[in-house]
Image (spheres, rainbow, N blue to C red):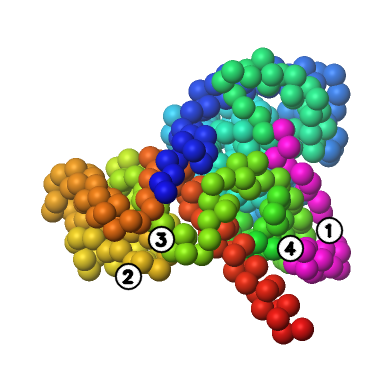
Amino acid sequence: MIYSTNEVKKRIHIDSQREAFYDFDHILQEEIKLVKSEKYLEKLYRGLPFEADLQAISTNIAEDFGLDGKLEISNKRNSYYYFGSIYIHPICWNNKNLETLLHEYAHLFMDCFFSTGHETAHGGEFAAALRFLLDFYDIVPKETYNELISTFAEDVSLYDNYIESFEFLTIEEFCKEKTKSKEKEVFNNNFTCRKFYLNFEKEEIHTKDQYHFYYSNGDKNKFIRVVLNKFAYETDHPFKKLSIEEILNTRLVSNVFIMDWHARPVKKYEGFQGFAEYRGDYFLHLKDDQETISSVSWASPEIVHTNNSQRFDICIPKEKVSGTRYANKKRKEYIQKCRKEGINIVTSNSQLEFDFLQEQLKNRCHELHHQQIQEKKMLEY
Ligand SMILES: [Zn+2]
């Protein structure tokens, strides 16, 4: 039994919508100009003059959502979002281009509030995040946004039902809701993570069809619940019916790529301050597992693979000049060896695809684990 990824999901290309989205930005920009000429955007400006600079507007947004992000003038050729901070191109800054600010805020919102881990930078989820912001501030209503984006339908997708709800809660409501959600059928383990640069504690609860995210920032007295809908392909896929034995007999093998020391794929390894000793090393891995990577990393120049979690890691030092070719060869050998042994092989061709497939396998594991617990409970009664 071998699944090709084509059977599992549609292919996601890395940020294929970007250029088209920039065109859509221009349309939005015109729309915002029009709206601004007709009405005062009270919810966003709050007494500020219309000529207010982006800094003042950004301060209002940050205050509304309890964010700690910085806003700066970009010294690159474009405006961009990076690790909780927004950098605005000088021309957009001088023109007080609200659309640019909101576009970058949509990236920040994707990172902070709306990320499930397999979205692309300007994908359908991003389009939904930008719509959320424009709607939240009564700038462009959802219906108008949908109409505007529909003229780009061939090039820009909008995941219409991605964001189910976004609510500010009191701390009492927050705790109550969280407990209620936990009592529901839960697939993934709960876990908390901290967006250190935005100062939010996040707790995730995955139900069958939805992601429930709980954000708290006690310092800013912000308690937020976000519910995102899963896509059909996230819940309905061939892995869904695998038994424990079949899962244990399955290996997920990734594409070959270079990554930085955070285990993020990169085109070119640039290194980080203080980690210069790793510069230039080629890393290839088949699972996003930083712990594994740091423990196998620099020690073994060859292949490391563990059987317990469908994982296969390769690590190649800088000295191997043809690192990619070498890794591809090793990957092929590994696949052949597995097939001979009767192991199911699932391959992927991009990092996004791999992350997605891995999530599916994990979900099935959690599901089986959950079933086992339930069955055990039944026996105990
Ligand atoms: Zn962007």
Q: Nearer the viewer, residue 48 or 14?
A: 14
In space, the residues marked 3 and 1 are separated at their CA atoms by: 45 Å
Pointer 2 or 1: first along the chain:
1
In space, the residues marked 2 and 4 are separated at their CA atoms by: 35 Å
Stretch in magenta: 160-184
In space, the residues marked 4 and 3 are separated at their CA atoms by: 27 Å
Residue farthest top in this picture:
151
Give the quadrant of residue 192. bottom right
User: Which residue is at a point 73% across and 77% down the rendered structure image?
Assistant: 378
Say which residue label 3 marks.
249
Q: Which mark is residue 169?
A: 1
Name the secondary structure under disc 3: loop
Residue 181 lies within the magenta run: yes
Which-is-in-front pick, marks 3 and 1? Answer: 3
Q: Which mark is residue 295?
A: 2
Q: Is residue 379 visible?
A: yes
Image x and y of residue 58, in percent = 68, 42
On screen, 141 above or below 171? above
Residue type, numbered disc 1: Leu
Name the secondary structure under disc 2: helix
For disc 3, the neighbor class at 10 Å (few under 14, some 14 to 19, many from 20) is some
Image x and y of residue 307, in percent = 36, 66
Name the secondary structure under disc 1: strand
Residue farthest bottom in this picture:
380
Say which residue label 4 marks.
185
Q: Nearer the viewer, residue 70 or 209?
A: 209
